[in-house]
Image (cartoon, rainbow, N blue to C red):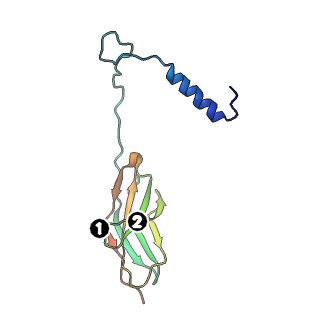
């Protein structure tokens, strides 16, 4: 058999090894070749701290500066979200590195009100949410 694609060759070898692998008795049966594993270490899940003191400051008629405080010890980064009502329909509008504590929102439309929150992301999909802030009144 001639395989020109290395991935096809690897796939065929894996499938063959699975097909010819020995089948062991479940660990709870007598005469088992597989022993249950004893725990050797505990799994520690790091707690992600929610960003605090989120504030929105109007910079111009079309720009808004969001600032917050964050611990960052278990945080991998921040996602900025926007909603039209502050309770549902949250959309991701940007991301900030774990060392960042601000985000500039641009292209705001006149007379539109939005709500913002910051999401701290940690390992394993763990997230924590900041307080919610609304768009401050427009500067003239």
Q: Tell me the number on the disc at residue 127.
A: none
Viewer-nearest residue: 2 or 51: 2
Viewer-nearest residue: 117 or 113: 113
> Percent position (x, y) of residue 103?
46, 68
Task: Answer few, some or many: residues within 10 Å of disc 2's Cα (few below 14, many 20 plus, some between 14 and 19).
Answer: few
> Percent position (x, y) of residue 53?
33, 66
On-image quarter of the C terminus:
bottom left
Q: Residue furthest bottom?
A: 140
Q: Residue furthest front?
A: 1
Q: Tell me the number on the disc at residue 87.
A: 1
Q: Residue furthest top?
A: 31
- Residue, x 40% and y 16% (percent of image)? 24
On-image quarter of the N terminus:
top right
* Numbered marks: total: 2
Q: Which residue is mark 2?
A: 91
> Percent position (x, y) of residue 69?
38, 63
- Residue, x 38% and y 16% (percent of image)? 34
- Residue, x 66% and y 34% (percent of image)? 6
Local secondary structure at mark 2: strand
Task: Answer few, some or many: residues within 10 Å of disc 1's Cα (few below 14, many 20 plus, some between 14 and 19).
Answer: few
> Percent position (x, y) of residue 61?
45, 84
Do labels 1 and 2 touch, CB within 8 Å? no
Marks 1/2: CA–CA distance: 12 Å
- Residue, x 29% and y 17% (percent of image)? 28
Viewer-nearest residue: 32 or 76: 32
Q: Is residue 7 above or below residue 62?
A: above
Where residue 67 sits, quadrant-wise, is bottom left
Say whether residue 119 is left or right of residue 10. left
Where residue 72 sits, quadrant-wise, is bottom left
Local secondary structure at mark 1: loop
Say whether residue 99 is left or right of residue 47. right
Q: Is residue 85 above or below residue 11?
A: below
């Amino acid at each position: 058999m001639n395989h020109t694609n290395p991935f096809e060759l690897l796939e065929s070898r894996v499938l063959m090894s699975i097909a010819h692998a020995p089948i062991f008795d479940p660990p709870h049966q007598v005469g088992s070749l597989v022993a249950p594993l004893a725990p050797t270490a505990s799994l520690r899940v790091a707690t992600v701290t929610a960003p605090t003191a989120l504030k929105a400051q109007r910079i111009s008629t079309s720009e808004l500066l969001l600032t917050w405080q964050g611990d960052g010890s278990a945080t991998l980064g921040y996602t900025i979200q926007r909603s039209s009502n502050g309770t549902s329909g949250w959309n991701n509008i940007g991301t900030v590195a774990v060392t960042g504590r601000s985000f500039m929102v641009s292209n705001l439309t006149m007379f539109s009100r939005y709500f913002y929150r910051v999401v701290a992301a940690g390992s394993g999909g763990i997230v924590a949410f900041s307080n919610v802030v609304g768009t401050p009144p427009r500067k003239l």
